[in-house]
Amino acid sequence: MQKKVELLICPRWLLPIIPAGVILEGYALVVDGGHIVAVLPAREAREKFVARETEVLGTHLLMPGLVNLHCHAAMTLMRGIADDLPLMSWLGEHIWPAEAKHVSRRFVYDGTLMACAQMLAGGTTCFNDMYFFPEAVAEAARVLGMRVVLGLTVLEFSGAYAKNADEYLSKGLAAYKALQGAPRLSFCLSPHAPYSVSNRSFERLVVLARELQLPLHIHIHETREEIAQSLKEHGMRPLERLRRLGVLGTKLIAVHAVHLEPQEIAQLAAYGVSVAHCPTSNLKHGSGIAPLVSLLEAGVNVGLGTDGAASNSRFSLFEEMRLAALLAKGNAEKACVVNAHCALAMATMGGARALGLGDEIGSLEEGKGADLCAVDFGALGLSPCYNPVSHLVYATSGNEVSHVWVAGQPRLKNHQLIGVDTEALKALAEGWRREISL
């Protein structure tokens, strides 16, 4: 007797991520109750299951939804306001003043709504956010149906959201308590950076991270200027300061990690630290190129992040995969390093593991959440196709994403966002452009 299920997807190729290096042809994926029920040959799936809906995607590859390990979603409303600048000038002279003037709950909700629509259209189903007004981020993600890891941001200086680190933390913990149990929602503690957070605040966050079993998510070793400042003020490099404060032992997600000494890479591996690699943002600010090959060879878990649209301009994890792989090959002068399967693993399981979601998303395995992305290989620019995994990383841009599901619910179908008025979003963005330009 056939079992009734909600959805049966029959793509040309199916890329499970686990086992590594495997690509399946002629297989189907079965979804029910928001989870993957089975991955099996399509003929067998039709014999065993009767689906309320069947998607036959004859020119497509089906893969897990992508995981954006680091972004500031609401900053999509600041895309392009201060380009071609080094990081600290960009922050101190442009971004922080603009935030002080314009950031509000409405700004964060609208900007996150825009970001979620753009991420979904490019195959991203989960993002790890670091920004203000976390309840507004959560609400925008809920409306668009995305999975979000909500960063509870901490800074020492006053801003539109809080006056000092104590207030940031108090408001963040209130949001944490209020939003407990919300679907597709989990949390990180997000101290901004070593140069913007005090020892006292780090010590409090370490205790909380252990009590609440939450990852810590922080910008670290992004620029040489940051390291020089730490040596001057603390007599040690930022990573060593964090080590002495106990931060490295807290399921740490180290964002950027561009300028690392060999012994620091070994420390990251020894402490089980994950790295959020953001190659486009690092290049755009002239910050440098992270030692990706050395990190991977040391056994460090690496995921990919776009950073905010203000420092990247795009939310395409397909572009991050391609750039990460090509930069690694160029740096190592070895074409074999960071192959296509490795790049895809970073954009899926790497991010999921870093966020503590590796048992829930990041691969197409029975029992996991049905966060899925289908890429159409029918375009002329993708023909001929000898190796679909290679094409995903080196030939696609993300515009080929045609279908997206989050927890089994369709969010993009035939390139059209579901339940999203894109013209209204454009008008919203234009309204903010006029306001910010005044």
Image (cartoon, helix red, strand yellow):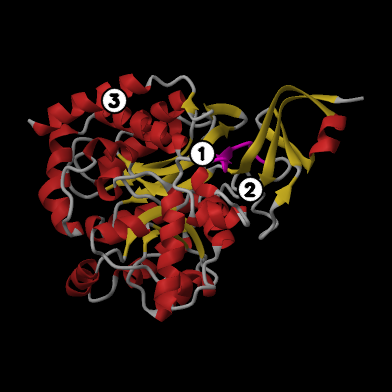
Q: Which mark is residue 363?
A: 2
Q: Which residues are magenta?
A: 368-378
Find residue 139 and report its horizontal and vertical position in percent.
40, 26
3D distance between C-alphas at marks 3 and 2: 33 Å
Q: Is 39 above or below relative to 388?
A: above
Of mark 2 and mark 1, the one earlier in the sequence is 2
Type of amino acid under label 2: Ser
3D distance between C-alphas at marks 2 and 1: 17 Å
Q: Which residue is mark 1?
A: 401
Q: Which residue is mark 3?
A: 426
- For this rendering, which residue is in front, 124 or 203? 124
Q: Which mark is residue 380?
A: none
Type of amino acid under label 1: Val
Mark 3 closeness class: few <14, some 14–19, many ≥20 residues within 10 Å: few
- For this rendering, which residue is in front, 335 or 310? 335
Q: Is 362 above or below relative to 269?
A: above
